[in-house]
Image: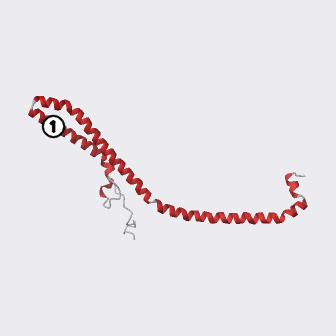
C-alpha cells in the first residue's frame, strides 16, 4: 500500500537538516553515532567539572588536602578520560556488531534468490550439453563419409 505522495509506507522518507535523523519517528536510523562526538566532549567536560569541584572542596577543607588533590587531579582526569574513551569505543563496537547482524538478517532472502538463479543457469547448461551431444552424434554419423572423401587428411594435413 502506498501513501498519497506515492511513497511506500514501509520506506522512511529521508529528512533533511543539520541533524537528519531527528524526525525519524520509526527509529529506522540511529542518531547515536552522529551525536557520539558531542556526547564524548560533554562527558569529558563533566568529568573536568567534577574533578575541579572536588579540588576546590578539598582546598575549602584544608590547604594541604587541596594541594594533594590538585597534584592528583591530572592523573585522575587521565584515568577518567581513558575510562570514558574505552566505554564509548565499546558502544561503537556494539553498534557495528548490531549493524553486521542486521545485514546478516537479509542473507536468507538473497540466498533464496540465488538458488532460483542457479536453477535457471543449470537449465541453460543442460540445454547446452544436449546441443553438444546432438552435434557430437551428428559428427559421428558423418565421420565415415568424411573419411571416405579424404576431407580430414586434406584439412589437417594428415596422410
Residue at the location (75% across, 66% down)?
134
Q: Mark yes or no: residue 117 visible.
A: yes
Q: Position of residue 4 (x, y in %)?
A: 36, 69
Task: Name the colouring of the figure.
Answer: secondary structure
Q: Position of residue 8 (x, y in %)?
A: 40, 66
To which residue does mark 1 refer? 54
In-front residue for pair 132/30 = 132
Left or right? Give the position of 76 relative to 98: left
Q: Mark yes or no: residue 18 visible.
A: no
Q: Residue furthest bottom?
A: 1
Q: Position of residue 143 (x, y in %)?
A: 84, 62
Left or right? Give the position of 13 relative to 71: right
SS at circle 1: helix
**Rendered view: 40 above or below 66:** below
Residue at the location (36% across, 48% down)?
93
Left or right? Give the position of 154 relative to 125: right
The quadrant in which the N terminus is found is bottom left
In which image quadrant can residue 101 be found? bottom left
Amino acid at each position: 500500500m502506498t501513501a498519497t505522495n506515492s511513497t511506500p509506507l514501509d520506506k522512511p522518507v529521508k529528512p533533511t537538516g543539520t541533524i537528519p535523523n531527528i524526525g525519524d519517528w520509526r527509529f529506522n536510523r540511529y542518531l547515536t553515532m552522529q551525536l557520539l562526538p558531542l556526547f564524548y566532549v560533554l562527558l569529558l567536560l563533566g568529568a573536568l567539572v567534577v574533578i575541579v569541584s572536588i579540588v576546590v572542596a578539598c582546598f575549602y577543607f584544608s590547604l594541604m588536602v587541596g594541594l594533594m588533590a590538585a597534584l592528583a587531579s591530572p592523573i585522575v582526569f587521565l584515568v577518567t578520560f581513558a575510562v570514558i574513551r574505552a566505554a564509548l569505543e565499546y558502544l561503537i563496537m556494539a553498534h557495528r556488531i548490531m549493524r553486521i547482524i542486521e545485514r546478516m538478517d537479509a542473507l536468507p532472502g538473497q540466498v533464496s534468490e540465488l538458488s532460483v538463479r542457479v536453477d535457471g543457469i543449470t537449465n541453460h547448461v543442460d540445454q547446452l550439453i544436449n546441443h553438444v551431444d546432438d552435434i557430437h552424434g551428428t559428427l559421428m554419423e558423418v565421420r565415415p563419409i568424411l573419411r571416405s572423401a579424404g576431407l580430414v587428411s586434406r584439412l589437417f594435413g594428415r596422410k
